Amino acid sequence: MDIRDANEIIACLPKERTVYRYCNDEYAARLLAPKLGSAGVPVRDIRASRWGRLLDRKPVATVLKHCGGANLSNNDLLGMPRENDRAYVLTLGLWGWRGGDRSYYQTSRPGVNLVLQVNFDREHDETYQRVARPVSKTDLNYSAHPVCKSGRTTMAWVRLDLDLASGQALIEEVQNDWLRGASSARSAAIRAIESGRPNDGVWGIGPARRVKPYCEYVLKRHANDWAEVALSAAIGFLCDEIGISQVWYHNSDTGVRMKRIKWSKPPRSIYSSLPRSFCFERTSQAPAFLVPTAPKALGRRMKRCQEVFWRMDATRKLN
């Protein structure tokens, strides 16, 4: 997207911190609520739609069990159970620039991406300092990635390309450094401890005997659903803050071609099982705003419906 549009979005949004609360499987309720309305929709109709799989996620299933009605409304979902409730802080950044190396920035078209950064809360940051006792400013994020640079610790981020004229957005990437780093650091700490060297430094952070319990704490709390949290936050941001009506998501193979990825490919699950769990539908129709700037051969393939994407009409009601 054009850097002026990206900067305008950042300038127009509130400057104070945006707290994002999330509990296990909350994405199901967040996706369903705007499709139901206060009047509700017959449960059998939801079950028969492609959104039906969301009824089986625990918070929604518990609501269904206790409400006992044939209809489900957005008001019913307000009473869902909240297991493992956590708080995150959302910030925005930019990634890429006009004329930059697109194989490095991995943007699907020239310009920049808007980056939604999902940051840990202060409780996490205080735990990191208290338990790991880092001996330097080294942390588990890669500084060359689009993480928050203004005092927040980024758990994950989502890169977004927006076309404001059409009310469409493309999710370019869902990624994290911190938790992958914590997994590797934990393994290194265990090896040092088992070798009788508990005071050995790990990744420049701190001694193995302190790094290990911190890594186990953060992995237990966040590792299983970090991508779910990030994607849920991104969809909410696009729909509620920007007014986007249609959200696109890269398929694994098409994304590699569009973003000109030359080196290690991202995990396929991020571009297959994750969008599927969020009820994106596979389509051979490409986002129209991508076609004009695509390389000629790839552009022809998209016009012929030979490439695969994921698509969600995020604001369309079931009835």
Image: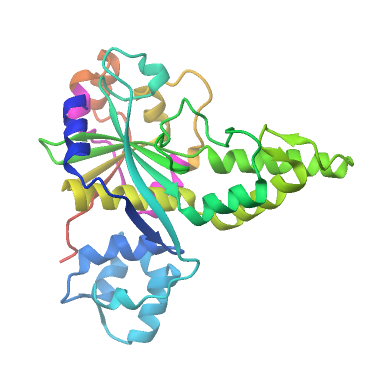
Locate residue 259, reporting x and y percent.
37, 23
Residue 279 visible? The answer is no
Q: Is residue 263 magenta?
A: no
Residue positioned 66% across, 46% down in the render: 132
Q: How many marks?
A: 0
Q: Is residue 288 magenta?
A: yes
Nearest the camera: 262 or 198? 198
Q: Tell me the residue at 76%/42% (across/down).
A: 208
Quadrant in which the N terminus is drawn: top left
Q: Position of residue 20 (x, y in %)?
A: 36, 56
Q: Which residues are magenta?
A: 270-291
Q: Outermost residue toward the left?
A: 165
Q: Residue 171, image x and y in percent? A: 32, 38
Tell me what residue is drawn at x 82 percent, y 39 percent: 192
Q: Taking 189 as reference, is 288 left or right?
A: left
Q: Which quarter of the figure has residue 77?
A: bottom left
- The quarter of the picture where residue 147 lies is top left
Q: Which residue is the extreme one toward the right?
A: 196
Residue 311, compared with residue 201, is above or below; it is: below
Q: Would you say 50 lies left or right of 206 here?
A: left
Res 191 quadrant in image: top right
| Residue 270 seen in the current view | yes
Position of the C terminus by quadrant: bottom left
In the rendered image, residue 176, in percent from the top left (x then y), is placed at 49, 39
